[in-house]
Image (spheres, helix red, strand yellow):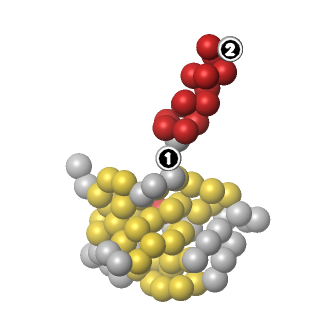
Amino acid sequence: MKNIFFVIIFFLFGCTDNPRGEWFVIKETNLYDEVNGVKIATVKKGSFCSKGGVAYGKVDRYAKVKCDKLSGWIIEDENLQEIK
């Protein structure tokens, strides 16, 4: 019973999809409204973003991001460089 409690706590607090950290956009990339969704904007080179969890669509791997006032999903997360 104790183990189940710790597993539940881990999934509730240990795994988050909320974008965090600071990332710098090194190449323009498309922003989608959801996984396998439609393009809603283009994130410009030089923008700053926070990057969250990943999800897998039908073909591509998506990363959740929040850039300036935009938020959504990107496919090309190699276009982001972490700021340390």
Residue 64 relative to residue 59: left or right: left
**Could you classify mark 2 by the number of other residues whose Cα lies within 10 Å: few (under 14), some (14-19), or many (20 or more)?**
few
Of tags 1 and 2, the one toward the viewer is: 2
Front position in the image: 8 or 68: 8
Residue 19 relative to residue 82: left or right: right
The residue under the point 30% across, 65% down is 24
Question: Please, what secondary structure does the residue beneath circle 1 have?
Answer: loop
User: Is residue 65 in view?
Assistant: yes
Task: Specify the farthest residue to the right.
Answer: 58
* Quadrant housing residue 44: bottom left
Q: In the rendered view, would you say 36 is above or below 42?
A: above
Q: In the rendered view, would you say 32 is above or below 23?
A: below
Q: In the rendered view, would you say 79 is above or below 37?
A: above
Front position in the image: 78 or 43: 43
The residue under the point 64% across, 83% down is 38
Question: Please, what secondary structure does the residue beneath circle 2 have?
Answer: loop
Question: Are circles 1 and 2 on residues that touch, CB within 8 Å?
Answer: no
Residue bearing the label numbered 1: 16
Position of residue 10 measured from the top left corner of the image (x, y, whole percent): 54, 31
Circle number at residue 1: 2
Position of residue 42 measured from the top left corner of the image (x, y, whole percent): 45, 84
Front position in the image: 67 or 29: 67
Position of residue 21 measured from the top left corner of the image (x, y, whole percent): 32, 53
Mark-to-mark CA distance, 1 and 2:
24 Å
Q: In the rendered view, would you say 64 is above or below 20?
A: below
The residue under the point 76% across, 65% down is 58
The residue under the point 56% across, 77% down is 32
Position of residue 79 measured from the top left corner of the image (x, y, whole percent): 42, 67
* Quadrant housing residue 2: top right
Three-letter code, disc 2:
Met
Image quadrant for the N terminus? top right
Disc on the earlier residue, 1 or 2: 2
